[in-house]
Image (cartoon, helix red, strand yellow):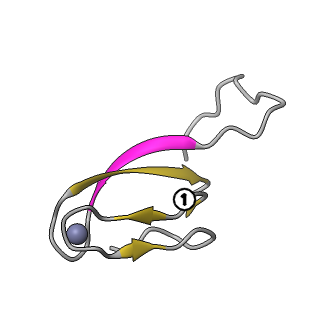
Amino acid sequence: MAILDGCSGKSWTPTVQERPCPTCGEILEVFTKDGVVTEEVTCPKCGLVIEAGKAFPQ
Ligand SMILES: [Zn+2]
């Protein structure tokens, strides 16, 4: 198990991650929180929409 460090902030801070588009492989900047996408992202290359509220598709 990972060791949790003491950075449990008060604010609800999503993490920006670079993830490859599951369809075309384009690198997308995705905001996630606990593995769940928090902002809808549209791939600029193939037009795939990554919906908010779901885990990033693999
Ligand atoms: Zn794509």
SS for dot 1: loop
Residue 23 at what x, y percent from top left?
Answer: 21, 77
46 vs 43, left or right, is: left
The quarter in which the C terminus is drawn is bottom left
* Side of 30 where 15 appears, left or right: right
Tag 1: Cα neighbours inside 10 Å, few (<14), some, or many (≥20)? some
**Number of dots carrying numbers:** 1
Residue at the limit of the structure toward the right, as seen here: 10
- 53 on left or right of 48: right
Q: Position of residue 41 (x, y in %)?
A: 44, 62
> Looking at the image, which residue sits at the far top?
6
Can residue 57 be seen? no
- Quarter of the image holding residue 46? bottom left
| Residue at left offset 68%, top offset 38% | 13
Residue at (54% x, 52% y) in the render: 32
- Quick check: is 16 in the magenta stretch? yes
Q: Which residue lies at the image location 52% right of the left edge and 70% below the top edge?
A: 55
Q: Is residue 23 above or below residue 5?
A: below
- Secondary structure mostly seen in magenta is strand
Read off the residue under disc 1: 35
Q: Is residue 47 magenta?
A: no
Q: Quadrant of residue 25?
A: bottom left
For the question of whether residue 2 can be seen, the reply is yes
Residue 9's place in the image compared with 49, above or below, is above
Start and end of the magenta stretch? 15-20
Image quadrant of ligand 1 equals: bottom left
Quarter of image, res 2: top right
In the rendered image, residue 38, in percent from the top left (x then y), is placed at 61, 58
Closest to the observer, 22 or 49: 49
Amino acid type, callout 1: Gly
Residue 17 position within the rendered picture, expressed as x and y whole percent measured from the top left: 40, 45
